[in-house]
């Protein structure tokens, strides 16, 4: 049974997506219940598989018992196990958030909403497990198609934002597929392990170089790495809160995972960091993105839009770790994937919950909410401090490893960028913390909407806030057990 876990995780999510679609026609609440159960099953399988990887090594599943490298393969190793925990764990908590405030949809008949969400999660899990380049593309497009639909159900300019995202992501997918074609014509195989074994003799081939450039460029576009981020602010701002959380917390992080996988298990660090300076380009683009994303976040007055530009800077931290291409840098990048998933999900749910309860979206109207929504704003404070990088939160430890990686590489510019961005993050989060806990005046918008969020709205928010602290405390266990095997090749 344990050897079937790699295929059971994405298949269970995609299988239940059909049932949730049928139930959504009858009653959306039943559909949500099945989606929660499906994601709980996927998370349980991910935990089970992770313990097996820690104790016995990686798992591999070959479809149809076709031998490798001919057949299609799913691989569960330390890196994919880590990503599966992030995807399924974050998705499970997000699905607990009520439908109306989370997706801006009434709980009525005829809406296949949760089927699309499960397809998104199944695609993300497939990305983490795919052992060949083409099936990774298939799952990448499943996630993209699902997200186009989910973004479009938002308010305001959501339809146009979804269309712009469709155009940009389609270009990124086309680049990736073109690169895979170049690699296949050069090596005659699509299996990642087989490609890695064959490429060293072909490093000087123009087709291999072109394939690597196309693949990395396409994935960076889907990752929204500066300056290819232009689709992200609008998509996050106008998407419903839960969809924005999925985008920021797991989808663009999965694209970052692809680049890390290419660096470690396909093209190797020797090629991407030494022979072809792709990691250097990613690192310097990320450094610019960290600063520009943080500055743009300071300029915003709408809370969700501030979080959207913050995501531009936060995903750039992961790019910075990839750019360092050393064990400490990659460790910091992976830790930040998990930390960002938790703290940004918490913040987007708070934005959605507050808007649903009070109608408040402007930062200036948050004045005094700390006294009327103490638990919600306590969770906000924890996540905000984590975004800044205050210990002992998860955000501190990921930045700490990035700082150590910069020191190890002797890259003082990256070190300065991390420190400067921490100050910039403090500017836009501390100004909001100050407003939240300041006394409200009778004329303030918050004064007209007393009361805490309902338990169904508050519970997922508090779970994320607690996990931000817990992951901070156990980060050394995560690094020693899951991430150290990942970076051994560096």
Image (tube, helix red, strand yellow):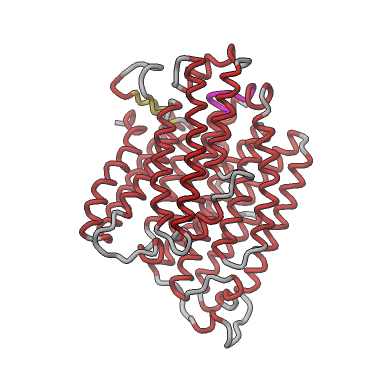
Does residue 57 show up? no
Q: Which residues are magenta?
A: 263-270
Asked if residue 186 lies left or right of residue 142, the reply is right
User: Camera-side residue: 451 or 258?
Assistant: 258
Q: Residue at x 64, y 39 (%)?
A: 321
As drawn, 23 above or below 182? below
As drawn, 223 above or below 307? above
| Residue 324 x, y percent position in the rendering | 68, 35
Q: Residue at x 34, y 23 (%)?
A: 62
Q: Name the dominant secondary structure of the magenta segment.
A: helix
Occupied quadrant, residue 302: bottom right
Quarter holding the N terminus is top left
Q: Residue at x 56, y 56 (%)?
A: 308
Asked if residue 64 lies left or right of residue 480, the reply is left
Does residue 10 show up? yes
User: Camera-side residue: 110 or 262?
Assistant: 110
As drawn, 267 above or below 458? above
């Amino acid at each position: 049974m344990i050897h079937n876990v790699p295929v059971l995780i994405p298949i269970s999510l995609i299988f239940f997506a059909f049932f949730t679609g049928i139930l959504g026609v009858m009653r959306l609440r039943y559909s949500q219940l099945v989606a929660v159960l499906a994601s709980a099953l996927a998370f349980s399988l991910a935990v089970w598989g992770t313990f097996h990887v820690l104790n016995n090594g990686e798992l591999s599943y070959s479809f149809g018992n076709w031998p490798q490298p001919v057949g299609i393969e799913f691989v569960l190793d330390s890196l994919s196990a880590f990503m599966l925990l992030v995807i399924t764990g974050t998705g499970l908590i997000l699905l607990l958030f009520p439908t109306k405030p989370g997706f801006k949809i009434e709980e009525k008949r005829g809406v296949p909403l949760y089927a699309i969400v499960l397809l998104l999660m199944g695609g993300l899990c497939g990305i983490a497990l795919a052992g060949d380049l083409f099936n990774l593309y298939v799952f990448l497009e499943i996630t993209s198609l699902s997200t186009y639909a989910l973004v479009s159900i938002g308010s305001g300019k959501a339809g146009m934002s979804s269309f712009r995202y469709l155009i940009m992501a389609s270009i990124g997918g086309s680049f990736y597929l073109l690169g895979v074609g170049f690699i296949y014509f050069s090596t005659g195989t699509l299996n990642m392990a087989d490609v890695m074994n064959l490429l060293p003799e072909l490093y000087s081939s123009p087709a291999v170089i072109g394939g690597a450039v196309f693949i990395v460029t396409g994935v960076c576009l889907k990752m929204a790495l500066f300056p290819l981020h232009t689709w992200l602010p609008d998509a996050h701002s106008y998407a419903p809160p839960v969809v924005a959380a999925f985008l920021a917390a797991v989808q663009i992080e999965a694209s970052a995972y692809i680049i890390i996988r290419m660096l470690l298990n396909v093209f190797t660090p020797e090629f991407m960091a030494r022979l072809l300076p792709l990691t250097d380009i990613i690192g310097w683009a990320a450094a610019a993105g960290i600063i520009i994303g943080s500055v743009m976040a300071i300029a915003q007055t709408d809370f969700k839009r501030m979080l959207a530009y913050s995501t531009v800077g936060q995903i750039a931290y992961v790019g910075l770790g990839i750019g360092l291409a050393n064990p400490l840098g990659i460790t910091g990048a992976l830790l930040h994937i998990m930390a960002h998933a938790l703290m940004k999900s918490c913040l987007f749910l708070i934005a959605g919950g507050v808007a649903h309860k009070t109608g408040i979206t402007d930062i200036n109207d948050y004045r005094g909410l700390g006294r009327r929504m103490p638990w919600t704003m306590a969770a906000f404070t924890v996540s905000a401090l984590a975004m800044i990088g205050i210990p002992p939160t998860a955000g501190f430890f990921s930045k700490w490893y990035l700082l150590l990686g910069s020191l190890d590489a002797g890259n003082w510019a990256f070190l300065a960028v991390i420190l400067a961005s921490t100050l910039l993050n403090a500017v836009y989060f501390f100004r909001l913390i100050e407003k939240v806990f300041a006394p409200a005046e009778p004329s303030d918008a918050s004064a007209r909407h007393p009361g805490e969020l309902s338990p169904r709205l508050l519970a997922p928010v508090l779970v994320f806030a607690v996990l931000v602290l817990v992951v901070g405390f156990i980060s050394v266990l995560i690094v020693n057990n899951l991430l150290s095997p990942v970076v051994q090749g560096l």
